[in-house]
Image (cartoon, rainbow, N blue to C red):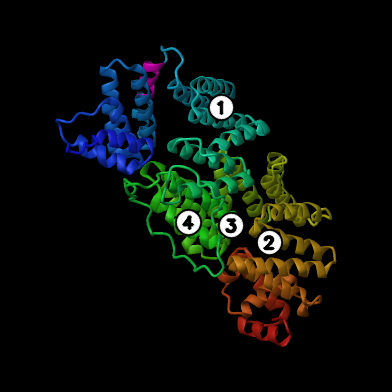
Amino acid sequence: MSAPTTIDPVERARDAAARESWAEAYALLHAHDRHPSRGLTADDLSVLADAAWWSGHVDESVTARLRAHAGYLAADDHRGAGLAAWWLHYEYLGLGRPAAAAGWLHRARHHLEGLPDCPEQCFLAWSDAEEAQARGDHEAALAAARRMTGLALDSGSPDLLALSRQAESGVLLAAGRRTEALALLDDAMCAVSAGELSGVFTGWLFCLALTQCMDAADFGRAVEWTNAAMEWCAPPWSGRPQEDGREARTETAGAPTPTPLAPAPTPLPMTVPSGENPFRGVCRAHRVEVLDLLGAWALAEAEARQACREVPVDCLESAAAAYYAAGDVQRRQGRLDEAAVSYGHAHELGRIPQPGLALLRLAQGRADAAVAGIDLALACRGRADHDVLGLARLLAARTEVALAVRDVSGAAEAAADLDALAGDVPLLRALADTALGSVALARRTADALSPLRRALAGWLELRVPYEAAQVRMLLAAADRAAGDEEAARLELGTARAVFERLGAVPDARRAAALLSAGARRRLPGGLTAREAEVLRLVASGGTNKDIARALVISEHTVARHLNNIFAKLGVGSRAAATAYAYAHGLL
């Protein structure tokens, strides 16, 4: 009998790579490469580099790629050397080494630009499109993206064709050609959802599409592709989207309140565990933003914490986004100290934590800091060629902050800018109508109800509960101004129920106070509705700081209200004012 044939480990590694079993391929090639007598070809070194990258060994990936480039160069294979050089550009860029990245991109051009058209030149065209986009040269960016598409079509590669569609979509979107852009994006994502692409291109397309959808404020697509991305990322990872059509779960009833995020964002691990999907943390960070808008706050915070553990070292901006989103959740729940810590972590990782930080300062009664922070963020923002949603949120916050300091003209200017930016994009339109309605309400004009009702309809259509409840609060004020007390009570009651479900404690208290204020049309002692709110909070034991947070006003304003209350009621202490409130049924 003959002895069984032993399969060469390199052949086994190639087979594992073809199946996208990257941990297996890495283990086999890494073990083989440790023996000096066993050489690896340039192609095998490229496979080792890919397997190391997928397995989280970023430094080893770069080292293997450098050796692969040298091997291709020694064999006078300029296509192989050019592709290896482009990948080194990509990896060095992710590692925060732009000079090294620029050098390898130049070398990739040197290898590939003189050759006849070939698939590897797609990557150069992609880089050309991104560089032109960064310069604001939409015409050059579009020409490069379309050259990429032509090369991809000639190559017959589904991977390259889908990526080129996405690249062209991004250029068109930045140029304001939204309908064409989204049609191309949908085309690219069809290949993703059908499982037609390799793992790295599937991951790229998910990351690029999710960023594009959120930046463009296309919330419907963001929800759909976030769910699909997390299904694809879910362990055990097979490299293909799951076919059972299941969507990622949102918040479950009775979910425990998550613990705060880790106290420090650094140092993050240089690797992710072997066999992990390096796109998981990035996709999860996008999911946090979606869950936040959908009102699944407990799950959003838990996912943010997980995303910060999972992101690779070259994707720290995703961890920053997760910390920022967690800060937003904590702020709206009244957990102001925790929110400050989360925003601080986001800032440490390179993200400007606005407008969340300005709204936090407003909640803390630091109105001047809120105004300064939001104005500086808008001044640094510049044009809205991309991340339209980010600019829209800044303008919405600028409106809110300006109204809080009684700068109605400033609020009106910000709302008008937001209105011009919004167009007919549903999420932006809801933001703009909310801002327009709040300004009209502050001006005590009769046309506040119309934009506020449009805003409420928009938020309900998008299934964004917190913002819808905030609009209901504004509608209640408009209804009361119009003399419709019953409509006001209905809006306040619904808003209060939503705030309580979300855990938005300050807003729930404010809604409850306004409901109580409306229970008596004529207040004793000549008190105004706002003074009665302040008095109720005093009677419940609130300090000036507590009251300022609950009513989103400054402590100075609370003190002024208290002086007026004491004068009107003829009392000289908080205890006497509390006794008056009990005696006259104000509680």
Q: Is residue 496 above or below residue 321?
A: below
Indicate which disc, 3 or 1, sits on the residue closer to the N terminus: 1
Q: Is residue 154 above or below residue 270?
A: above
Q: Amino acid at mark 3?
A: Ala
- Local SS, label 1: loop
Observer-nearest of 48 and 61: 48
Which of label 3 and label 1 is nearer to you? 1
Residue 303 image label: 4
Q: Is residue 196 above or below residue 352?
A: above
Residue at which label 3 appears: 367
* In this rendering, position of residue 451 left or right of residue 509: right
Indicate which disc, 3 or 4, sits on the residue closer to the N terminus: 4
Indicate which disc, 2 or 4, sits on the residue closer to the N terminus: 4
Whole-angstrom CA distance, mark 4 to mark 1, is 35 Å
Measuring 56% from the left and 53% from the top, which residue is drawn there?
Answer: 247
Q: Amino acid at mark 4?
A: Glu
* In this rendering, position of residue 56 left or right of residue 338: left
Q: Amino acid at mark 2?
A: Ala
Which of label 2 and label 3 is nearer to you? 2
Residue at which label 2 appears: 469
- Local SS, label 2: helix
Which of label 2 and label 1 is nearer to you? 2
| Quadrant in which the N terminus is drawn | top left
Provide residue 271's location: percent of width, then percent of height: 32, 46
Q: Amino acid at mark 1?
A: Gly
Provide residue 381's location: percent of width, then percent of height: 56, 39
Whole-angstrom CA distance, mark 2 to mark 4, is 24 Å
| Magenta span | 104-112
Residue 136 image label: 1
Magenta-highlighted stretch: main secondary structure? helix
Whole-angstrom CA distance, mark 3 to mark 1, is 36 Å
